Amino acid sequence: MIAVVLLSLLSCAFFYVEAIKWGMNAKTWAFGGLVLGPFLMPMFAISRHIQWRNAVGFNNLYISA
């Protein structure tokens, strides 16, 4: 039981920091991390990718040389 609570709190902190880094709503992701724990990671990865694509644009080609 204690391990589940600790994992949930660590997920909450992780999603809060990552949401701030990516310019997303941090409180929403922190609450989601608190409730769902690490099961929120796939949805967070997709939302982070969508956030990045909206900032960069969908028809822009980015090549790092």
Image: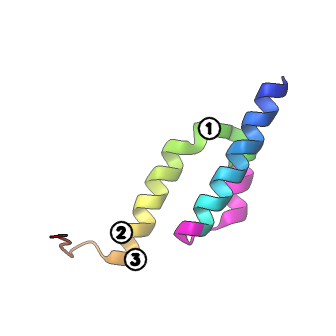
The residue tagged with tag 1: helix, strand or loop?
helix
Of the residues shown, which amino acid type is indicated by label 1? Pro
9 or 32, nearer to the observer? 9
Residue extent of the magenta highlight: 21-32
Q: Which residue is mark 3?
A: 55
The quarter in which the C terminus is drawn is bottom left
Q: Residue at x 74, y 39 (%)?
A: 8
Alpha carbon separation for disc pair 2 and 3: 5 Å
Disc 2 residue crowd, few under 14, some 14–19, many 20+, Cα 10 Å: few
Of the residues shown, which amino acid type is indicated by label 3? Ala
Alpha carbon separation for disc pair 1 and 2: 24 Å
Q: Which residue is mark 2?
A: 53
| Residue 23 lies in the magenta stretch | yes
Is residue 51 left or right of 57 when viewed as pictured?
A: right
For the residues bearing labels 3 and 1, Cβ distance under 8 angstroms = no
Q: Which residue is mark 1?
A: 38
Q: Position of residue 45 (x, y in %)?
A: 47, 51
In the drawing, what numbered circle is on residue 3?
none
| Residue 56 lies in the magenta stretch | no
Of the residues shown, which amino acid type is indicated by label 2? Arg
Magenta stretch, main secondary structure, is: helix
Sequence-earlier tag: 3 or 1? 1
The quarter in which the N terminus is drawn is top right
Residue extending farthest to the top is: 1
Disc 1 residue crowd, few under 14, some 14–19, many 20+, Cα 10 Å: some
Is residue 19 left or right of 34 when viewed as pictured?
A: left
